Image (spheres, rainbow, N blue to C red):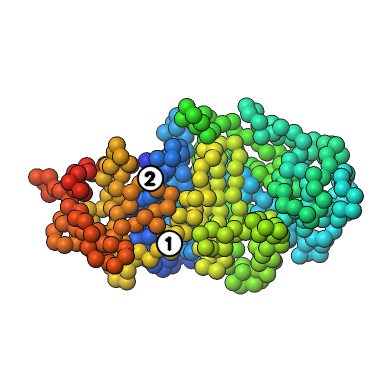
Amino acid sequence: PSTVNHTNHGRPMTKLTVFLFASLLSPSLAAAEHYDNELALVESWLAAQRAYDNVPGLSAAIVHGQDLAWSGGFGLADIESGQPAKADTIYGICSISKLFTGVAVMQLRDQGKFGLDVPLSGLLPWYNLEQAFDGSPQTTLRATLTHSAGLPRESDYPYWMPPDFDFPSSEDIRKKLGEQATIYPADRYFQYSNLGLTLAGEVVTEQSGTGYDDYVRRNILGPLGLTDTETGFPTDKREPRVATGYSYPGRDQQLKVMPRYDATGITPAAGFASTAIDLARFAAWQFRAMQNGEDPVLHGNTLREMQRAQWLDWDWGTARGLAFGIYRVNGRTLTGHGGDCPGFNTRLYLDPVSEIGVAVMANRNRVDVDGYAAAIYDILDSGGTPEGGPDQSLDDFVGSYDLSPWDGEEMVFRWKDGLAVVSLPNMHPAESITRLTQDEGDRFYTVRSDDGKPGHEVLFLRDANGEVTHMRVHSMDLPRLDD
């Protein structure tokens, strides 16, 4: 099943609805119209690729500036009940939580509560983690936010182990901290640290005089209108929309239900839950704040500071901002964060230059959500929508045709002023597009990529009722798949 919230492209789509970000995104449809064919390909490709990858449910959203260009859900939020995944399905967003913790820290920094180069010991009176290296710089908040403080990756509890995923409380973390030590000198190496961002959350609590959850709700989630984002899985009227998480299927390809975890003391690093739509709202706010400068939640210049490289490994392999990751993806420089927790994989990418944000969320471990998001950017950049309206006479041919046992399917879709085809499954669809040019009627030819001349014949076959039932390629009649 596929459920899609979608800006109106002037053509039928799966369960098409118009969705506007009330008070946060403008109602302009310009972004959707500019990417008409590209968004249609994103939708069709995600629906198919999810199934081939054995992902129970997938939700995604694309924001362009202040416009929600597209959002949708595919597959199942819960296999047993058959509940479909939708754009407003709630997922554990895991380490994307770190972005909200970073915003909270920077709010307090901007209020003059502290500086980023203050040692953690000066911000947390109970901080007693051993510095194991003579001559090491002090462990500062800045280094903590960039994962370069030399801190251990985790608080010393096995909370990532099944079957219970028993996370420690804040009190437990404090008690154990004195038994732990740095693993590197500060400011020497990148070492991703959930403990570090957990301690950053403790700084928010200590320096604001407010509990972490209450602070974030009052100063970030509420003002931004992120009504489906929580510091844990909601237990109120939103709970029925929470997806069930599933394990990596392993060699036996069996999807196993994962327990609903509570990150408790690790919440600032990995405990939040949200939807694709809310993450798109979060991205749109960042674009708006950076454009306008002044913003009641966080100044645009502070957001730029957070997204600017504050740490770069000696080999240029890893770049980090303040809580944000910085990534080179297919020639683009993107920021954002990914998440990986029991039963969930999520990704939020933002391009501050083009102001395009992409959120992808899956309710299964080890899903290539980074690859899905990167492919979406590639599709949007591929220039498939011409000026002028679509040629409705080509509707008959759009769809997928069975290529088994050799492959999955041949997917035919609108592209530029005609049609194109791509073989699935395929994690790089934009690189694999073959355009089709119409000869006459149901006869087409592929377009050679090197010189633009006709290639081999593609013939569509119809039944007695005039419905297209097969695509003939190289003398093979490929049957059309049901939608």
Report x, y in % for residue 340: 60, 42
Rendered residue at 42%/43% (across/down):
50
Q: Which of 86/134 is in front?
A: 134
Relative vertical location of residue 468 with respect to residue 363 in this rendering, above or below = below
- How many residues crowd mark 1 within 10 Å: few (<14), some (14–19), many (20+)? many
Q: CA distance from mark 2 to mark 1?
A: 19 Å
Quadrant of the rendering where the C terminus is positioned: top left
Report x, y in % for residue 186: 81, 53
Report x, y in % for residue 462: 14, 48
- Amino acid type at circle 2 is Pro
Quadrant of the rendering where the N terminus is positioned: top left
Q: Is residue 119 among what the camera can see?
A: no
349 relative to 36 in the view: left or right: right
In the drawing, what numbered circle is on residue 380?
1
Q: Is residue 287 among what the camera can see?
A: yes
Pointers 2 and 1 in contact (C-beta within 8 Å): no
Indicate the quadrant where residue 380 lies.
bottom left
Rendered residue at 56%/53% (across/down):
348
Q: Which of 125/241 is in front?
A: 125
Report x, y in % for residue 396: 20, 53
Rendered residue at 28%/62% (across/down):
448
173 relative to 375 in the view: left or right: right
Q: Which of 33/236 is in front?
A: 33
In the drawing, what numbered circle is on residue 425?
2
Rendered residue at 76%/43% (across/down):
152
Relative vertical location of residue 151 with respect to residue 172 in this rendering, above or below = below
Q: Earlier in the sequence, mark 2 or mark 1?
A: 1
Q: Nearer the viewer, mark 2 or mark 1?
A: 2
- How many residues crowd mark 2 within 10 Å: few (<14), some (14–19), many (20+)? many
- Amino acid type at circle 1 is Leu
